[in-house]
Image: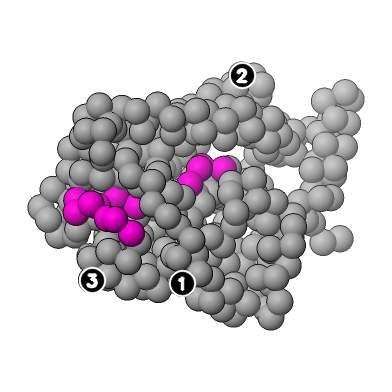
Amino acid sequence: MTINRRNFNTGVGAIGLAAALTGVGAPAFAAKTLIYGNAGNIDSASNKFAKKWLDLVTERTGGDLNFDIKAGTIGGGKDVLDGTALGTVNLYNGAYTGLREFDVFYAPYFARDSNHAQAIANNLLFEELNSAVQKRYPSLRYLSVARAGPWKLFTNQKLETFDDLKGLKIRAPSIEGVIAGLEQVGAKPTVIPFNELYGALQQGVVDGMATLGNLMISQKFYEVVKHCYQNDWGIGLDKQMINMGTWDSLGEKNQKILTETFNELEPQDFFRATEEAEISNFKKWRELNGEDSTPLLDASAAQKTLAPAIKGLADDIFGAGTYDRIQSI
């Protein structure tokens, strides 16, 4: 049987429940300490959520699973994901995948908002995304996405319109959708790993950046860049990946606890928390950088400029007609 998101949870639930009730089929399990890795610091929304999620998993597994959270200490997103593929990290959380199928979500206006992006990732294109992960990283299992909130643009020079991005060197991660969007509006995307970003801004290597908005305060970016725009500039989805050897070693019961606890907590303790944090983050930014430091620009012209490139990217990656299918849900 082909295992997909829809029948996987059902099968795991049935096996896990049977084992819990009867003891039959429940393998002996030695307690494990698993390394969870993320490129952001421990105060980021992703890692605050991770601690709550994983602490509850530890409680619900009766201590079978414990977690060592490596937050911003083992490299950028690519380093952490590569470590998970190798098995030196057990559980990955982050934006980076190195896969076009995920990268396109970060293209400005690919999805209308975070809820739309989640519906695309978890339903409309789930099988395509799962297949892409297995093809590129045979040693990884794709678990889920979390709605990390919108990405934002940050610049030192104040933009009056998005046309003012022309010629500016704007930091981008190694994510195709971000790069394509910046190129389409005439900026010069400059790829810099997240863990090197603060220093690059401090030294003037770039004129600004594109990154997840909810990192603006926790990463102290207000110290090295002046303006953060309220407009959404792509949608952030944190991908959860686990090393396949680690996954197989957990047993069905603990696999179920790990995934179902995540799904239970994500809507309130991550997504809603990021929405609420954005309001307070922008307020704090204005307190630190001035009332005019969080402009809201007219995005209509930029959307028209970007639409052909985003449609072309989506259809190239997933097949003709994909962009229209996405817009219809």
Q: Is residue 157 magenta?
A: yes
Q: Disc 3 marks which residue? A: 167
The quarter in which the C terminus is drawn is: bottom right
Residue at left offset 73%, top offset 67%:
325
Total number of numbered discs in the rendering: 3
Q: Residues within 10 Å of mark 3 (few under 14, many from 20)?
A: some
Q: Nearer the viewer, mark 3 or mark 2?
A: 3
Q: Disc 1 marks which residue? A: 305
Kind of residue at disc 3: Gly
- Residue 82 falls in which quadrant of the image? bottom left
User: Horizontal placement of 15 versus 100: left or right?
Assistant: right
4 to 89, vertically: above or below: below
For label 3, the SS is: loop
For label 1, the SS is: helix
Specify the segment rendered in magenta. 147-161
In three-dimensional space, the C-alpha distance between marks 1 and 2, rounded to whole angstroms, equals 50 Å
Most common SS among magenta residues: strand
- Residue 68 falls in which quadrant of the image? top left
Q: Position of residue 124 (x, y in %)?
A: 74, 60
Q: Position of residue 2 (x, y in %)?
A: 82, 61
Q: Position of residue 253 (x, y in %)?
A: 74, 33
Q: Disc 2 marks which residue? A: 59
Q: Nearer the viewer, mark 1 or mark 2?
A: 1
Which numbered disc, 3 or 2, marks the residue that appears first in the sequence? 2
